[in-house]
């Protein structure tokens, strides 16, 4: 009984902390291209993924996690949670990542990007029935999610002074579907929306919007996945790494033997528990962690 009470208190505390964060609408009005969407954003804590999710996002936002001013290093990152483009694993692949990085001086912006409309109260179950047609259903939404990712990077750069970050130290990272968004942004940008680094984690690379190939000024990239990914996506990370290498761009690849799909910030007592430490090491090596 005591264990359940403790878990309940921790969950309440987590929600309270998030509620205190600054939440910024990504667009001044309705998101371009989805002005007629009526679905209402919803949070679900109990589901097949065993982690809090949000779904039916139609109004993209950024949840801001600022570091202690004494630790702030001028680097910022947009974080894109995954969830098959029908939900967002907002805690394990969003808020927890942001808290970890903010504790080390990085200003974080968790992006809620537009998703496929869910027609049930549990999109984690609904996704299973959608799998045969998921690529077809996700196609139009990926374009919206790319636009949201680009807008997020552009917003942070435009408001860099407000958040105490440098305009040349703004990156993007994402998980699974969010990794697809991240890679798509790394392929498609203007001077205002170019990420200074990118970190797609166990991404679906085949759905990435690649346009005209690896850009001439492509950002350095950190990539991670697990060989036993249940969706078979480890090879996607390898392909992305090979494309960056073929274009003679900077990249670092970590393929773990175990970890499965969606390891995020989950603790499994295996090496994937420490992928984010390796990411911080990489950021430091690339010059993004020092003041």
Image (cartoon, rainbow, N blue to C red):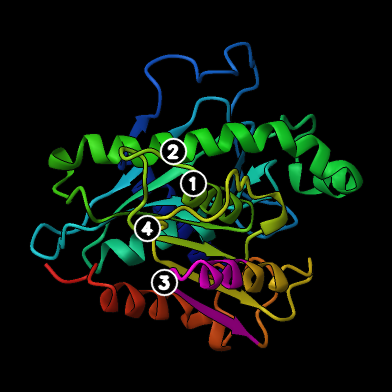
Residue at image location 54% in from the left, 88% down from the top: 271
C-alpha gap between disc 3 and disc 1? 16 Å
C-alpha gap between disc 2 and disc 1? 6 Å
Q: Quadrant of residue 70?
A: bottom left
Report the front residue among 205 and 187: 187
Query: On the rendered image, what quadrant is the C terminus found in?
Result: bottom left
C-alpha gap between disc 1 and disc 4? 19 Å
Magenta segment includes 86: no
First of labels 2, 4 by sequence position: 4
Report the front residue among 214 and 121: 214
Quick check: marks 1 and 4 in contact, CB under 8 Å?
A: no
Question: What span is in magenta?
Answer: 240-256
Q: Which residue matches tag 2?
A: 150
63 shown above or below 170: above
Q: Quadrant of residue 241?
A: bottom right
27 on left or right of 271: left
Query: On the rendered image, what quadrant is the N terminus found in?
Result: bottom right
Residue 185 is labelled as: 1
First of labels 2, 1 by sequence position: 2
163 shown above or below 33: below
Quick check: marks 2 and 4 in contact, CB under 8 Å?
A: no
Report the front residue among 154 and 257: 154
Would you say residue 114 is visible in this rendering?
no
* Residue depth check, mark 2 versus mark 3: number of the one nearer the observer: 3
Q: Residues within 10 Å of mark 3 (few under 14, many from 20)?
A: some
12 on left or right of 271: left
Residue 250 is labelled as: 3
C-alpha gap between disc 2 and disc 3? 21 Å
């Amino acid at each position: 009984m005591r264990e359940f009470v403790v878990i309940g208190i921790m969950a309440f505390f987590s929600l309270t902390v998030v509620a205190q964060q600054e939440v910024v609408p990504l667009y001044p009005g309705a998101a371009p291209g989805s002005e007629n969407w009526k679905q209402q954003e919803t949070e679900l804590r109990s589901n097949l993924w065993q982690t809090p999710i949000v779904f039916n996002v139609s109004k993209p936002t950024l949840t801001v996690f600022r570091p202690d001013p004494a630790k702030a290093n001028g680097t910022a990152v947009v974080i894109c949670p995954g969830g098959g483009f029908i939900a967002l694993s907002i805690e394990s692949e969003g808020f927890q990542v942001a808290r970890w990085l903010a504790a080390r001086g990085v200003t974080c912006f968790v992006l809620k990007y537009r998703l496929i409309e869910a027609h049930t109260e549990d999109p984690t179950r609904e996704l299973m029935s959608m799998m045969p047609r998921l690529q077809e259903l996700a196609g139009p939404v990926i374009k919206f999610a790319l636009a949201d990712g680009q807008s997020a990077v552009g917003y942070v750069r435009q408001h860099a002074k407000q958040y105490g970050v440098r305009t040349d130290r703004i990156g993007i990272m994402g998980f699974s579907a969010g990794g697809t968004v991240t890679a798509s942004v790394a392929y498609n940008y203007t001077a205002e929306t170019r990420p200074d680094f990118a970190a797609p984690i166990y991404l679906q690379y085949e759905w990435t919007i690649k346009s005209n190939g690896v850009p001439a000024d492509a950002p350095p990239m950190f990539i991670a996945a697990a060989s036993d990914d249940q969706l078979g996506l480890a090879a996607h990370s390898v392909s992305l790494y090979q494309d960056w290498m073929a274009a003679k761009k900077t990249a670092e690849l970590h393929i773990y033997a175990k970890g499965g799909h969606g390891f995020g910030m989950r603790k499994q007592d295996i090496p994937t528990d420490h992928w984010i430490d390796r990411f911080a090491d990489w950021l430091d090596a690339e010059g993004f962690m020092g003041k």
